Image (cartoon, rainbow, N blue to C red):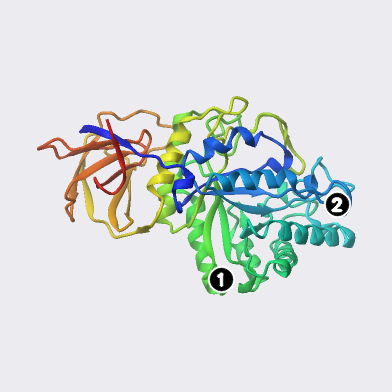
Amino acid sequence: MKLIGKLKIRPSNEIKNSRIGIGFECYDRDLFTPEKCYDLAAMTGAKAARVQTGWARTEKEKGVYDFSWLDSMVDNLLKRGMEPWFNVGYGNPLYMSDAPNSTAVGCVPTLYGEECLNAWIDYVKAMTEHFMDRITHYEIWNESDLSHFWYPEKPSAKGLAELIKVTGKAIREVYPEAKLGTCLSGSHPDYIYNLFSNLEPKDLDFYCTHNYDRFPDNSWRSRRDVITRQIMEELGFGHLEMWVGECGHASWHPKGHGQCKEGGGSEHRQAVWHLRRAFLDLQNKMKLTSYFMIVDLWEKPYEKAVEVLTRPAAHGILNGITYTPKACHKAVSNAANVLADENEVIEPFALIEGRSCNPDTPSTTVFFKHNGKPCMAYWLACPVEVEEAHETCHIVLIPMKKLKDPVVIDMLTGDVFERDQGEFKYPLREYPLVYCERDTFEIETK
């Protein structure tokens, strides 16, 4: 195929909406320097930014709230065209004398007595009043189904429901129009059923799942999301938006990591995973895909409830310490721009027929309309550990609906190709390529 240019990347302030977001989590524990991240984040075109609120960082003296650190993050994101949304948590050592870590990460205020719970309610009301002119969405707690984030008791769906009701009431007393949500790491259906059984439909507006599966094309979490939708429908929560509130694949893993037991990784593997996830989430009708996170957390120890990591997996799209972009930064930029504006899943309009390589490995296709124009994302669904470029791998594409002037966008590099006259082969890679009309996306020509 003939190279004709590159996909034009619009920054966040030039995009009305995108399905792609980037996490700015962990600043509540002061684990990175956000000033080094804002411009590079906005360059991608991503719109949403998940921010953790940090009770312990805000209230260091009982009854005295200092939101200046959080103001700075919210305002810096907003002025660059990004839209922050809050994850509301964690605990506070002022009211939790036996907190197992310095910022009471994972310590649940409903489990520490009346003074602590009342202080939590006061804090939540103060936070909501302070930010209600800038923040519309409030996600209550983080990954409560993991013992790391539900301390000092064992994870409890009924306990989370209680926390949602108490916290949601405090938020809506101040800001009745607030959109409320919660999130799980991908819990067992029994936990999910018990959670929604102890809530009322009016308690929530959105629900977030987290996806860190090693193999995105055969994700047990995605299958569980189907079950979750069924449970929500059965119990009267079919109105909830479903988001992927956290997801990602690290460019480096320590040995024994749940995502990669043998350790290691690469920037290429990370970028491949992120690109596949973006289109799979579109296919699964998730409203948002938020990548964890903006930068590797390598400046300070990372505390969970009863565990401290000195060098956690490198999930950032920026390198830790140096704050330089990884290959994934370019991939996320391409995804945020291709999945900006209006996108909807459609019926297939083309078939893949014949392949010059990997005959036993399936390919994945996602058909969608971008601003009303048909597109097909497709890739070789091999394990992400396969880092070959597959430069000689091609397919024959049989359109059931012929495109007038088709091009192919390489989602890893942003390169755009047109078919040479008389050529019917199209490239196949281990990451998504997008087949579409030439005028679907803006192309910067050479």
Q: Residue at x 65, y 59 (%)?
A: 133
- x, y percent for residue 304: 73, 42
Closer to the chain start, of discs 1 and 2, is 2
- As displayed, is residue 328 above or below residue 123? above
- x, y percent for residue 138: 64, 59
Q: Label 2 amino acid?
A: Val
- As displayed, is residue 216 above or below residue 393? below
Label 1 belongs to which residue? 237
Q: Residue at x 48, y 35 (%)?
A: 329
Q: In 3D space, how far apart are the residues under numbered discs 1 and 2 (Cα atoms)?
A: 37 Å
- x, y percent for residue 393: 25, 33
Residue sitting at the far front:
79
Quick check: can you spot residue 362? no
- Indicate which label's residue lies in the foreground, 1 or 2: 2
Q: Residue at x 71, y 50 (%)?
A: 53
Quick check: can you spot residue 218? yes
SS assignment at label 1:
loop
Q: Is residue 38 left or right of residue 132?
A: left
User: Dots 1 and 2: beta carbons under 8 Å?
Assistant: no
- Classify the position of the N terminus by image quarter: top left
- As displayed, is residue 94 above or below residue 133? above
Q: Residue at x 60, y 55 (%)?
A: 187
Q: Label 1 amino acid?
A: Phe
SS assignment at label 2:
loop
Q: Is residue 276 left or right of residue 373?
A: right
Instruction: Say which mark, if any, is on residue 64.
Output: 2
Q: Quadrant of residue 113?
A: bottom right
- Classify the position of the C terminus by image quarter: top left
Q: Nearer the viewer, residue 45 or 194?
A: 45
Q: Residues within 10 Å of mark 2 (few under 14, many from 20)?
A: few
